[in-house]
Image (cartoon, helix red, strand yellow):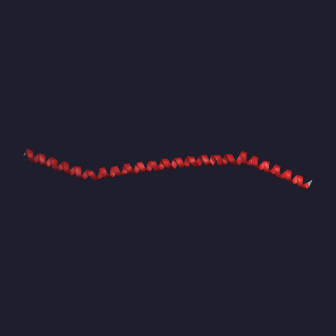
């Protein structure tokens, strides 16, 4: 009789643990998975944004490097034009 009671208690405890897992643990695991996916998407967007920003900074640096040459060319053209008018 004791063996039967132990088996029945074991079954009841197993059912209780399965219920607890379904009601409490699994929703937490599901939410954690959802949050992980959201974080991965945000990281992907951040990487894309940083790559775009780096590209823009590179283009800006290139334009800044061109400015002295443009100024010198404009001065040269102005001097040539003034010399031609004289």
- Front-most of 72 and 59? 59
Q: How many marks?
A: 0
- The residue at the point 65 percent across, 49 percent down is 29
Q: Percent position (x, y) of residue 86?
A: 7, 46
- The residue at the point 9 percent across, 48 percent down is 83
Q: Percent position (x, y) of residue 7?
A: 85, 53
- The residue at the point 79 percent across, 48 percent down is 15
Q: Is residue 38 left or right of residue 25?
A: left
Q: Is residue 78 left or right of residue 29?
A: left
Q: Percent position (x, y) of residue 57?
A: 37, 51
- The residue at the point 67 percent across, 45 percent down is 27
Residue lying at the far left of the rendered structure: 86
Q: Percent position (x, y) of residue 44?
A: 49, 49
Residue lying at the far right of the rendered structure: 1
Q: Is residue 7 left or right of residue 71?
A: right
């Amino acid at each position: 009789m004791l063996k039967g009671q132990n088996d029945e208690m074991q079954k009841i405890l197993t059912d209780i643990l399965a219920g607890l897992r379904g009601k409490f643990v699994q929703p937490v695991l599901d939410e954690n998975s959802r949050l992980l996916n959201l974080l991965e998407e945000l990281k992907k967007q951040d990487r894309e944004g940083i790559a775009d920003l780096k590209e823009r900074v590179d283009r800006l640096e290139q334009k800044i490097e061109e400015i002295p040459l443009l100024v010198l060319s404009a001065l040269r053209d102005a001097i040539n034009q003034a010399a031609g008018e004289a």
